[in-house]
Image: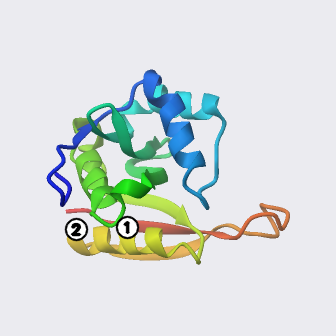
Amino acid sequence: MLQDDSPVEFVPPASDDGFAVNQLIEESPPLDTNSIYCNLLQCSHFSETSVCAKSGSKLLGFISGYLVPAKPDTLFIWQVVVDSSARGRGLALQMLNKLISRPDCSQVKFLETTITPDNRASLKLFQKFAEQKKATVEVSEAFTKTQHFNGQHDTELLHRIGPLT
């Protein structure tokens, strides 16, 4: 539940959620937008490692993730988005916890994500998650502004959290 006691359901996304996810991300700058097709794939191919937070028919939040092929004990969180009406209520942390407790994530010992250094909301979320799980956070460069983004996007730092308890 959110602080205003609105019932929230945490469910795996379905392909029918792809368009709503795309719109939520588009309405949430400075998040990087993906194509609707990409969001459809996230909601169908990666539904067991992604989560939607819904109140009635309203999409309040979405986390996309996947198990890293070369590291099956690692869940990579691609993107986290919360509707502006639901921010500041701990919804993103609730979604992360619901996601990590799913049967498909039972072997997960580490969570990874990339964050730009100026994204305070994400930094705070993943730090809080690590503290809650009594896990360490290792930070390293993942994709640099000059080498990987041709100067068109800030450097993404890899945050590796674990081992998870």
In the rendered image, the quadrant that contains the C terminus is bottom left
Residue located at (30% from left, 39% from top): 54
Residue 32, percent from left and from top: 64, 53
Name the foreground residue: 27 vs 150.
Answer: 27
Looking at the image, the residue that sits furthest to the top is 16
Point 82% across, 70% down: residue? 146
- Residues 14 and 103: in front is 14
Instruction: Tell me: residue 105, above or below residue 118.
Output: above
Query: Does residue 116 appear to the left or right of 135 in the view shown?
Result: right
Nearest the camera: 25 or 63?
25
Colour convention: rainbow
The amino acid sitting under disc 1 is Ile
- Asked if 115 appears above or below 107 in the picture, the reply is below
Residue for badge 2: 133
* Marker disc for residue 161: 1
Residue 73 spot, x, y in % from top left: 36, 49
Q: Are marks 1 and 2 in contact (CB under 8 Å)?
A: yes
